[in-house]
Image (tube, rainbow, N blue to C red):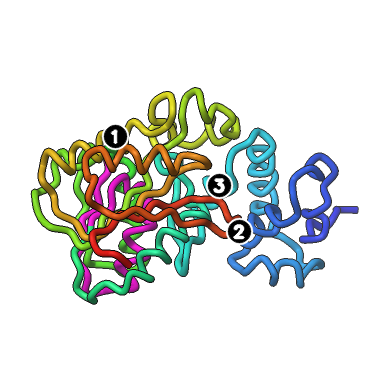
């Protein structure tokens, strides 16, 4: 008698019981083209054999530590979905705080902005989508990352972003920006060496590590902003736990007259640095 490959069976295969049910539901939803809650509501639905075989192979990859998002090529962020692959960092929920902080600034509808280290483009695209009259430059040193970000503008029907290949501000024209966003690599090779091994193994290290204390690229950014005399009203930068005071010191060395505020994420950890000219 042939065993039916139902959703229920797929969720409780003995070799893969250590994998969380939500990951299995997300994976099955991807293959069956339905929301994961709908998958859960159809436990007796029979899965086509070719899908079941692919599902098994992906579960084996998850057991090795491959992120689910690299298998489905989809990651939800803020109010949209983004294509991701091994060339870009998987967007984190913490970064949504940066997007929301930018929205809370109440900038004019046609503001000029630049997103540095854009990766998948999730920050720039989320804000460009919300403010279609805004004008964006999005820069990344990685050609492969820019290909992913460009694809995401198409998926999200965003047309007000100009992508450029640039090491920070190196190829950026000298102009005034209302807003600069930067989610640069901030993991230190020593101070923050406790990064998840699967993250280190499968996500692009160029998007993760930045010197011993994780702040080398922010040092370069601060010096570059000053040397190129680029004017800005607001700068938003994401950082890791306990880096806030050090990051403020880095920028204050070059911009002592600006204002600085640390913003907490949903876990009440300081996550975003806001630099601005006027007292708010």
Instruction: Indicate left or right for 155 with 39 as reference.
Output: left
Q: Which residue is mark 3?
A: 71
Q: Is residue 71 above or below residue 188?
A: below
Left/right of residue 232 with respect to residue 51 in the rendered view? left
Q: Residue at x 74, y 50 (%)?
A: 20
- Magenta residues, start to end: 114-140
SS at badge 2: helix
Residue, disc 2: 31
Q: Nearer the viewer, mark 1 or mark 2?
A: 1
- Residue 257 spot, x, y in % from top left: 22, 50
| N-term mark: 1 or 2 | 2
Of residue 169 and residue 236, the one placed in the foreground of this image is: 236
Residue at image x 44%, y 50%?
84
Q: Mark 1 or mark 3, which is nearer the start of the sequence?
A: 3
Label 1 to label 2: alpha-carbon separation:
44 Å
Q: Observer-nearest residue: 49 or 265?
A: 265
- At horizontal 71% and vertical 67% (from top left) the residue drawn is 39
Point out the tag, 3 or 2, that comes first from the N-terminus. Answer: 2
Q: Name the residue that disc number 1 marks.
A: 219
Q: How many marks?
A: 3
């Amino acid at each position: 008698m042939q065993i039916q490959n139902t959703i229920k069976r797929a969720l409780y295969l003995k070799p893969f019981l250590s994998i969380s049910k939500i990951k299995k539901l997300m994976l099955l939803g991807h293959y069956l083209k339905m929301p994961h809650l709908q998958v859960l509501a159809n436990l007796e639905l029979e899965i086509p054999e070719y899908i079941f075989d692919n599902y098994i192979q992906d579960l084996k990859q998850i057991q090795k530590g491959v992120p689910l998002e690299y298998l489905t090529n989809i990651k939800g962020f803020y109010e949209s979905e983004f294509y991701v692959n091994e060339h870009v960092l998987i967007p984190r929920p913490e970064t949504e705080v940066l997007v929301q902080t930018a929205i809370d600034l109440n900038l004019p509808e046609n503001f000029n902005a630049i997103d540095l280290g854009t990766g998948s483009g999730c920050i720039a695209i989320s804000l460009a989508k919300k403010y279609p009259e805004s004008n964006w430059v999005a820069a990344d040193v990685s050609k492969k990352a820019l290909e992913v970000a460009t694809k995401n503008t198409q998926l999200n029907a965003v047309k007000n972003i100009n992508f450029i290949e640039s090491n920070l501000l190196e190829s950026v024209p000298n102009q005034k920006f209302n807003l600069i966003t930067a989610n640069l690599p901030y993991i230190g090779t020593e101070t923050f060496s406790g990064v998840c091994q699967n993250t280190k193994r499968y996500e692009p290290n160029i998007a993760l590590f930045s010197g011993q204390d994780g702040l080398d690229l922010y040092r370069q950014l601060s010096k570059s902003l000053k040397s190129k005399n680029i004017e800005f009203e607001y700068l938003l930068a994401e950082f890791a736990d306990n880096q806030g005071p050090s990051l403020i010191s880095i920028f204050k060395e070059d911009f002592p007259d600006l204002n600085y505020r640390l913003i907490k994420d949903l876990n009440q950890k300081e996550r975003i640095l806001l630099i601005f000219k006027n007292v708010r």
